[in-house]
Image (spheres, coloured by chain):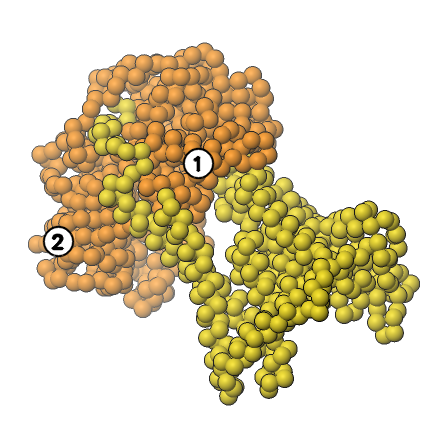
Chain colours: A orange, B yellow
Amino acid sequence: MTAVELAGITKRFPGVVANHDIHLTVRKGTVHALVGENGAGKSTLMKILYGMQKPDEGTIAVGGETVSFSSPADAIALGIGMVHQHFMLADNLTVLENVVLGSEKLHGIGAKARRRIKELSERYGLGVRPDVLVEELGVAARQRVEILKVLYRGATTLILDEPTAVLVPQEVDALFDNLRELKAEGLSVIFISHKLGEVLSVADDITVIRRGTTVGTAVPAETTARQLAEMMVGSELPTPETAESTVTDRPVITVDKLRLTAAGGKVLLDDITFTIHEGEVLGIAGVEGNGQTELVDALIGLKSADSGVIRLADREITAWPTRRRREQGIGYIPEDRHRHGLLLEAPLWENRILGHVTERPNAKGVWLDPKAAQEDTRRIVEEYDVRTPGIDVTAASLSGGNQQKLIVGREMTHKPRFLIAAHPTRGVDVGAQAAIWDHIREARREGLAVLLISADLDELIGLSDTLRVIYDGKLVADADPATITPEALGTAMTGAASGHLEQEDNPETSADGSQSPESEEDEAR
Amino acid sequence: MKKFDKERVLLAVAGPVIALAVAFVLSAVVLLASGKNPVEPFALMFEQAGFSDIQVLIINQASMYYIAALAVAIGFRMNLFNIGVDGQYQLGAMMAAIVGAHMNLPAVLQIPLLLLTAVFTGAFWAGVAGVLKVTRGVSEVVATIMLNAIATSVIGYMWLPTVFGVKVGNNNTTGEMYESGWIPGIDMGAAGEIYGLVILAVLLGIGYWIVLNRTRFGFDLRASGASESAAAASGVDPKRMVLTAMLLSGAVAGLAGLPILLGDAHTYNLSFPTGIGFLGIGIALLGRNSPVGIAFAALLWAWLDKASPELDFHGYDKEIAVIMQGLIVLSVVVSYEAVREWGLRRQQRRVGAELAAGHVLGGPDADNNTTKEVAGR
């Protein structure tokens, strides 16, 4: 019995990977995983299935009948519901109000609706309380509200877009239990992810999508994570090079008892102390929203600390404005490149100037030097493999990976001593990701100190020489990337563990033991 | 890359052309609706533009519009809306008139003194709004509107005979300025005189372009306007930039009334032109904040102003010109946004197409892309 079938879906877009001849069949009562790298076209496909976009070619069939959606309302009417990656809930309303919002006609807004919510919650083990304010709920609970919202509207096929991205491993397990309840009740789930371990544990069928097209299907029992990864990437994975430790004992950036509070007195960062040496990558693990953004802002000078000291080499820079910090060798790859790294409607060469307007080759004295800047932009475009027809096009017309390569090239050109890399490969395709890692590794060999913040635990563990865990604005734990597992790191990210994380003997994870066992002498705790 | 340059020119011209066409059509509709000939008024006004005396009037008027619009544009370039240009230029002109009536230095000193008086007065008045925004977070829109009202009161106070005022009949004036502060015009014979300070307007336009496009400061200012967050991350101090931009905008605004003051009026009285600051907003919009665009827009506005009185002699209302100015502003806002989005989408499409066709800057790159790896272990 087929719940949803997509055949020959093609969607063309300017400049980005769209969909090409996609085939996807979801059986009723199963969890169907759709895996692929960032930018492979998963989200576009789901937007098509949810009626947010119209395919250029191909057909959609629901329950065996060919349908055509012109808006999400059509999709909802046929029992397709979507749980977005970014929750769409009103914080200042209760769960009940959020659920009925927009669907007041179904069961009213009063006792009948409350009964229905309780009934759904019990039936699928969601544990949702209708009268709590959403702002009081944690991330996992909000996600369950989103799922309930979709069920309330009568969905029989649920699309979950990267549902685990915001969850810690323990919450992921709970979510998977919910998904199993759903499928036991005969509902179908389309589960979008690029985390292969999760996919293998929860899915009944797997469809792999690469460069906008479906490249194969698999059954978890007969496949391994490595095989899936190879399907996703499209070539055999090279074993990662044995990275030699390049850590020296010359400190580049020293942060001592940094404290930052919000206007209302809420503590955002507390007692942050760490040192990064020449040639060292310090990785910060943590669930988003635990102070990473504030830490970056404090280091680059966008927020000034309430107390504490920041030193660059032997100079105190706590009071320095952002520009001086950047001139003196702090490179910055921002978390949100559209907000902090680029002028989207300006040409590439002006974006090359951004952040380094006082430095050569961009300026001579108070005057800009557009010729030299343009020349250097051409060089960056070539050396960093930015795919663009020219340097006069706007930054907005490049794909995310190419925008990021431009930013990396720009920052590296000015030979930073200390690089802040916040999610350097987020939303970037595989090729660009590898290139960015290579650039960071290469600069590290030449003595660059890097603060790496990432939500991708594999990236953190793979690139870092030292790992610290941030939780609720504090660095609560440290770990050796050579021995730590993502699971143990995940536990610490929930605040459940602290101190030095020791991993009991685990042959699989210690295979990469050549990663530098980092000296712990400068660590605060 | 010439292709993209040509495209940019096309996009830059498409917006105003569409807006003007729409405005003409809508004005014609208004005329039709009131039972009049929809074409003849325009024909009459075009005819006016051919007379040399009207041309002089247009240029003189345009010079003031141009300076006011530049002042507005400085704010626009960094997302500040200086509605207070109107108060700033009136106060600037009045202070210059007062100084000019009470000081009598040789012309080489007197004229710079008067210009600086106007510059500092305008900058000070705008600076009040800037300081309020930076220190107290007051929206510059609200603050400058209020300051306009206050400026009107200040001017009324200064006109009191007990302060700086000199009554000439029923007219309030600030007294005749000493001749050393008069700037001779460019004699056009029977057509009249072009104000000497028209040259100042041209210089300001050139200076505006150089500062914005060729200096570090200009880059920071434009970056702040394009994305406040990105500018801050790039090292621009947002508060300082707000204050500097307000001061600059006010300084330029202060000069907007001087062409007529030093070239013709020689006193600040009740018939001194008002409302130029507000017109400057529409002109800056139409001119897309570009010095050349603003020049065309200022000339267009001045033409509508100076050619429309003729309509009264032919049974049409000269207010059709005002209606047209309003319609232009409306259609400008709509058409620019539409053209901008269309341009962005078009460029994305073309970049996609060029990349798909393999036109990549930097030549062969197929090889270095095959090495893929997963991070770490």
Point 44% across, 16% down: residue = A278
State the SS at label 2: strand
Q: Nearer the viewer, residue A215 or B68?
A: B68
Total residue callouts: 2
Q: Residue B177, position in %: x, y?
A: 85, 59
| Amino acid type, mark 1 | Gln
Task: Find out whether the residues at labels 1 and 2 contact each other: C-beta distance under 8 Å.
Answer: no
Tell if the residue under mark 1 belongs to the same chain as the one under mark 2: yes
Q: Note whether B228 is above or below A302 in the view shown.
A: below
Q: Can you name the residue that lies furthest to the right here?
A: B162
Q: Residue B127, position in %: x, y?
A: 70, 49
Residue pointed to by mark 2: A7
| Amino acid type, mark 2 | Ala
Sequence-wise, the earlier of marks 1 and 2 is 2
Point 29% across, 66% down: residue = A106
Q: Nearer the viewer, residue A328 or B3?
A: B3
State the SS at label 1: helix
The residue carrying pointer 1 sits among few (fewer than 14), some (14 to 19) or many (20 or more) residues within 10 Å by Cα, namely: many
Residue pointed to by mark 1: A374
